[in-house]
Image (spheres, rainbow, N blue to C red):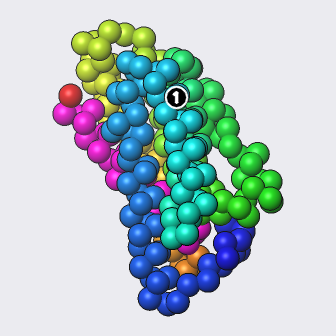
Amino acid sequence: MLTNPLAGTISLTPPQRATSRWGVFAAAAFLVSVPVFFQAPLVRVWPGLSLGLSVIWFALAYGLNRRPGWSLWGDLLMGFSWTWLAGSLYWGWLRWEPLIHLPIEAIALPLVLWPAYRQRWPVGMGFYLGSLFGTAITDLYFYLNALIPYWRQVMQVEPEMAPIVFENAIAQLQTPWALVCALWLVTTLLAVGFWALQVSRLQRWALGGAVLSTILVDGVFWLAISLS
């Protein structure tokens, strides 16, 4: 039986549990990358379509959760549905203001704190918390290195001018302070991610997969900017 996302257990045999752990980890890592590489371009062109897809994800999550053998993936998809909804709202209509990015991404946090909901969707809420934590760490890096003005600029200029903004932002990061911040924040993500993997609870592996994949996604993002 699934219970609390940080303290619950799941009734599986040891081989099933090991397979499920890595399956949940891989699925969580994949779902963290989906908004970056699929939703981001979609929401810029068709924000209404992206928002409408949220309904489909929620419906699919509920449907899978009610099917024997698929409930685990419906549970995980529920957490993804909340991250997709938040991303659609922010990047579709509010992306010009960085200060409200994290509050919008935290739209489902009250549900995570509600015991009845948390116990029904523990793996999904583990994934959601991991995604939110990764987002908070990434945003913190922007704040610590005074990148917020460049965030606003890149959301306002024409696409062909974006590389210039990126170039200026990269120049802002050519300092020892930026390197120290990057090392500290990556270390924090690694520590939290591997902490989550120390126990066999699937909700913790969903959290760990989301947190650790943030490092990869951020790395790919910065590499793309550097090469633009």
Q: Residue at x 61, y 60 (%)?
A: 66
* Element class at badge 1: helix
Q: Residue furthest right?
A: 115
- Which quadrant of the rendered structure holds the N terminus? bottom right
Residue 114 vertical placement versus 36 (above, below) = below
Q: Residue at x 40, y 34 (%)?
A: 39
Residue in the foreground of this view, choosing between 50 and 154: 50
- Which quadrant of the rendered structure holds the C terminus? top left
Q: Position of residue 69 (x, y in %)?
A: 51, 70
Q: Is residue 151 visible?
A: no
> Which residue in the protein does label 1 denote?
52
Q: Is 206 covered by the magenta stretch?
A: yes
Q: Is residue 161 left or right of residue 183?
A: left
Around disc 1, counting alpha carbons within 10 Å, would you say few (fewer than 14), some (14 to 19), or many (20 or more)?
few
> Looking at the picture, which amino acid does disc 1 mark?
Gly
Count of numbered circles in the view = 1
Q: Is 91 covered by the magenta stretch?
A: no
Q: Residue at x 42, y 11 (%)?
A: 156
Quadrant hosting residue 81: top right
Q: Is residue 183 left or right of residue 1?
A: left
Q: Is residue 63 visible?
A: yes
Q: Residue furthest bottom?
A: 14
| Span highlighted in magenta in the image | 202-227
Q: Is residue 189 left or right of residue 45?
A: right
Q: Position of residue 106 (x, y in %)?
A: 65, 40
Q: Residue furthest left?
A: 227
Q: Position of residue 226 (x, y in %)?
A: 24, 34
Q: Residue at x 34, y 53 (%)?
A: 216
Q: Main secondary structure of the magenta part?
A: helix
Residue 163 vertical placement versus 102 (above, below) = above
Q: Is residue 55 left or right of residue 103?
A: left
Residue in the foreground of this view, choosing between 224 and 30: 30
